[in-house]
Amino acid sequence: MMNTAEVYQFPVRQEIYKVADVDNGFTRLANELLEAIMLAGLSQHQLLVFMAVSRKTYGYNKSMDWISNEQMSKLTGILPHKCSAAKSELVKRNILITNGRQVGINKNISEWEDKNKVYPKKVNLPESGKECLPEKGKSDYPNQVNTKDNITKDKKDNNTPISPLPKKSPKPKFDVNQVQLPEWLDPDVWKNWLEYRSAIRKPIKTFQTFNGQINLLKECHDAGYSPSEVINPSIANGWTGLFRPKHSPKTRSINRIAQPVRTEQFISEDF
């Protein structure tokens, strides 16, 4: 018994060639307009939007018409918001003109704004200034600005260094050990007070603090208290300040000069 196979013949897909023909419609566009748009330096989006406006206006024998961003997007394949941005740039350069919601092509090519602007050779100034600026400099805008990548070593070396601001001289710090003490103040007692303040991390840093404590010691001294009677209790109790004692001052012993005693004894002398 023989096996037989059935062969299926699949139809061959025929390619359809599409040929442009003016019989299917055409857009009347002046050659001068085409030549001007080729020299206008448009971006890809701007050129496609220009061609879309041409198709929707001159393609229907209209000078202007309302063309939505979605219609231009369908013709150009560009997103609608990018079509709107490109149209705004063309309107700004007077290549496209608008009338309300309608848009069209400005056939007056002389009104188009050139992308490559040039500097004017002369600029009129007010009467208070000079008549005109000197005819110097390049006529075109510079194509390059100084950036981090194109600054050469020579340019860096030519930069004038900025002199630093003069520093203010610091004020001399107060040294309590260099201050002259009054005669009535025992240096050893005062030294013990300074060492105690340094040990508890509360040193006397300002003249105001020093002067205030000296004035207190002077008041206590005039009242009859010795400096040790004021300082020693503060050290013993862990205080950082000086206080007038609450007890009565001790009576100070006063050394008096003995007066000579007069006697009635007659001292004989040899004559």
Image (cartoon, helix red, strand yellow):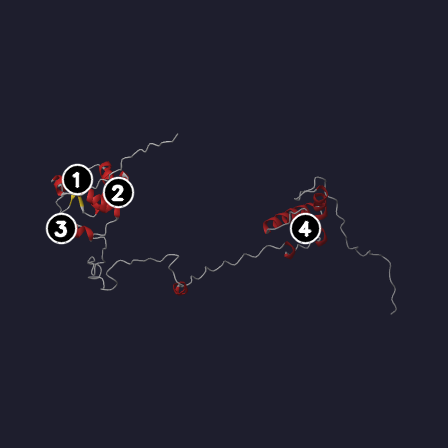
The foreground one among 254 and 90 is 90
Distance from disc 2 to disc 4, alpha carbons, whole Å, reads 80 Å
Q: Are marks 4 and 1 in contact (CB under 8 Å)?
A: no
Helix, strand or loop at mark 4: helix
| Residue at numbered disc 1 | 56
Find the distance from the CA under tag 1 to the CA under tag 2: 18 Å
Judge from the rendering whether residue 249 lies leftward or rightward of residue 2; answer left or right.
right
Question: Which residue: 19% across, 50% down?
Answer: 37
- The image quadrant where one finds the C terminus is bottom right
Q: Is residue 19 above or below residue 118?
A: above
For the residue marked with disc 3, what is the amino acid? Asn
Left or right: 171 as drawn, with respect to 98: right
Q: Inspect the image, locate mark 1, and give the three-letter code of the amino acid beneath it.
A: Lys
Is residue 264 shown above or below 63? below
- Secondary structure at numbered mark 3: helix
Badge 2: residue crowd in 10 Å (few <14, some 14–19, many ≥20): some
Residue 213, image x and y in percent?
A: 64, 48
2 vs 4, front mark: 2
